[in-house]
Image (cartoon, helix red, strand yellow):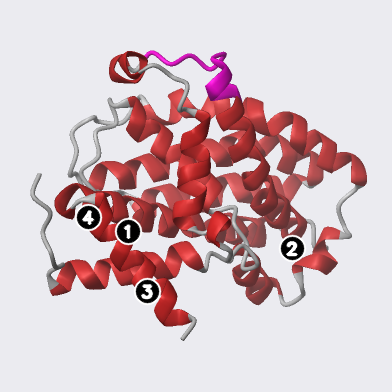
Amino acid sequence: MTEILQLIPEDAEALRIAHQHLEHPSLAARLTNFVGLPIERSLKLLPKAWYENLRQGMNRTLLTALEWAISPLDLQPGISAQEGYHKLLAATSGALGGFFGLPAVIAELPVSTTITLRAIADIARSEGEDLGDLRTRLACLEVLALGGRTDEDDAAETGYYGVRIVLALHLSRVPEKVLEKSILKPSHPAMVELIAAIAARLGIVVTEKTAVQMVPILGALSGALVNVIFIQHFQDIARAHFTVRRLERSYGSELIRREYDNYSRAEHV
């Protein structure tokens, strides 16, 4: 494919917005603005045993959610995403967790993660991605890692392309024919490593979300709102991620990476 030398204005603006979301993801800031107290203070409300339960359950949650969340979707690319519908599902799930307290919040984690991953896949499809392609499904998982970054993750290795490269390394040992046939099993060593890497980053934002849900003044209604903020966070990251991928398909990855880096340099001038 011959590389186009310049982005049209509409695509340049789309890349600028995508850069803003991908380089400055802050679920903590959104939740802090909502509940009115710092995330650090909210975290103190969580029992220590919860963190271990989170670590043990996150990998299983991602493995279970991956196929269930994506396979029922219409595989036809280009259909508009139903973002409001997935927010409604997330709100319902959060309301139940907020009403019954911490045990329900932990039990609700696989549900909210699956809803979030399904919303991500829906956005991927709307940006022209083929959900029948294993690479696309793995790109949906990448969004969970990208959304787990913090404002402090601004070094090159933790920037958007840095995270993509790190995650891609986990799959570098997978034969190309396996990816083409979309038969990569969860037990494959590369998949195990990928899931672990994503779970580590996702655990950051899940912990923040749960900490806010445990604030005493929050009930079922506020628990629903927390989940809406949570899924909106990942919908924004997904839209940005798959916008970049769409532009890479149209213009070539080198040009988009160069223009993306230009936005990063402009911020530090």
- Name the residue tied to disc 1: 257
Dominant SS type (magenta) = loop
- Residue at point 29%, 31% (across, down): 131
What amino acid type should be assigned to the residue bearing mark 2?
Leu
Secondary structure found at label 2: loop
Secondary structure found at label 1: helix
Which of pointers 1 and 4 indicates the residue nearer the eye? 1
Which of pointers 3 and 2 indicates the residue nearer the eye? 3
Residue 189 among magenta residues: yes
Instruction: Count neighbours of disc 4 (C-alpha within 10 A) and say few if under 14, some if 14 to 19, many if 20 or more.
Output: some
CA separation, marks 2 and 1? 42 Å
Which of pointers 4 and 3 indicates the residue nearer the eye? 3
Residue 263: give its label. Answer: 3
Q: Are marks 4 and 3 in contact (CB under 8 Å)?
A: no
What amino acid type should be assigned to the residue bearing mark 1?
Arg
Instruction: Count neighbours of disc 1 (C-alpha within 10 A) and say few if under 14, some if 14 to 19, many if 20 or more.
Output: few
Residue bounds of the magenta highlight? 183-192
- Residue at point 73%, 51% (across, down): 207
Picture layout, residue 144 above or below residue 45: above
Residue 26 among magenta residues: no
What is the count of numbered marks? 4
CA separation, marks 1 and 4? 10 Å
Residue 247: give its label. Answer: 4
Is residue 142 visible in the rendered image? The answer is: yes
- Name the residue tied to disc 2: 218
